[in-house]
């Protein structure tokens, strides 16, 4: 199995991840063919690639991007668990870029608030994301690493959320029996690489 993932493969993995297992605690797992699927488990989740602190920090960042409101948030959809597993099969360069970005943001949070992202209240995490968000037309040079990280984590979080039951069924109101499993991927040939 190749460790390099195309966008189409990631879409396919996410499609498989939308199948809920009623009455069971589910986890994301790698199928024999490399797809990420939901699997029933009696065990509590633990990170595959990230450390426990990194996974908790990631969960807080995801939740700051898609917070719980009248609908579930990113933690409810367990976006951080999906992203952790996705990273575990990503190329080494992508893993390093991601963990470097998370460490960069964590250091900024410690400097500003005296605690890291893993222990930060969501308002502190949101405050850290504000200056690096894509709502700004330009960013100072010292924030460039954070800006790239924000783009990556936002993309991953949105993808994980809207391919989950919480995003697809609960928030968007799509019928559960249709789900993303029928999604055949994008039609733009430039998006297939």
Image (spheres, grey):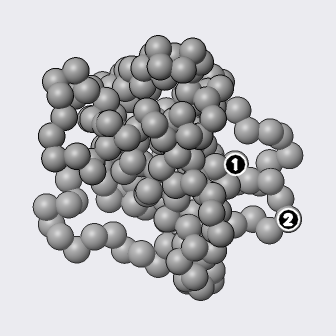
Quadrant of residue 169 within the rendered picture: bottom right
Q: Which of the two residues, 24 or 76, is positioned nearer the viewer here?
A: 76
| 59 horizontally vs 107: left or right | right
Q: Position of residue 100 (x, y in %)?
A: 37, 20
| Measured Cα–Cα span from mark 2 to mark 1 | 13 Å
Residue 14 as seen in the image, left or right of residue 70:
left
Q: Is residue 93 above or below residue 44?
A: above
Q: Does 5 appear above or below 181? A: above
Residue at the disc numbered 1: 27
Q: Are marks 2 and 1 in contact (CB under 8 Å)?
A: no
- Name the residue at 65% across, 69% down: 70
Judging depth in this view, the residue of 101 and 21 nearest the camera is 101
Q: Is residue 7 visible?
A: yes
- According to the image, label 2 marks what residue? 23
Residue 122, x across and y down, in percent? 59, 40
- The answer to whether residue 91 is seen in the rendering is no
Task: Judge whether 46 appears above or below 62 on screen.
Answer: above
Q: Residue at the spot x=80%, y=39% of the render?
A: 44
């Amino acid at each position: 199995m190749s460790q390099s993932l195309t966008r189409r493969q990631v879409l396919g993995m996410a499609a498989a991840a939308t199948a809920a297992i009623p009455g069971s605690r589910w986890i994301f797992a790698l199928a024999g063919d490399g797809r990420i699927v939901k699997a029933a488990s009696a065990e509590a989740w633990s990170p595959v690639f990230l450390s426990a602190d990194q996974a908790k920090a990631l969960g807080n960042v995801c939740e700051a991007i898609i917070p719980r409101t009248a609908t579930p948030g990113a933690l409810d959809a367990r976006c951080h668990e999906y992203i952790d597993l996705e990273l575990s099969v990503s190329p080494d360069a992508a893993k390093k870029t991601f963990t470097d970005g998370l460490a960069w943001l964590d250091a900024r949070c410690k400097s500003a608030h005296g605690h890291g992202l893993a222990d930060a209240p969501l308002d502190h995490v949101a405050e850290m994301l504000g200056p690096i968000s894509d709502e700004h037309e330009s960013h100072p040079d010292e924030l460039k690493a954070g800006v790239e990280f924000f783009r990556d984590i936002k993309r991953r979080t949105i993808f994980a959320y809207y391919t989950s039951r919480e995003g697809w069924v609960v928030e968007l109101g799509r019928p559960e029996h249709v789900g993303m499993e029928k999604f055949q991927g994008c039609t733009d040939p430039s998006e297939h690489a």
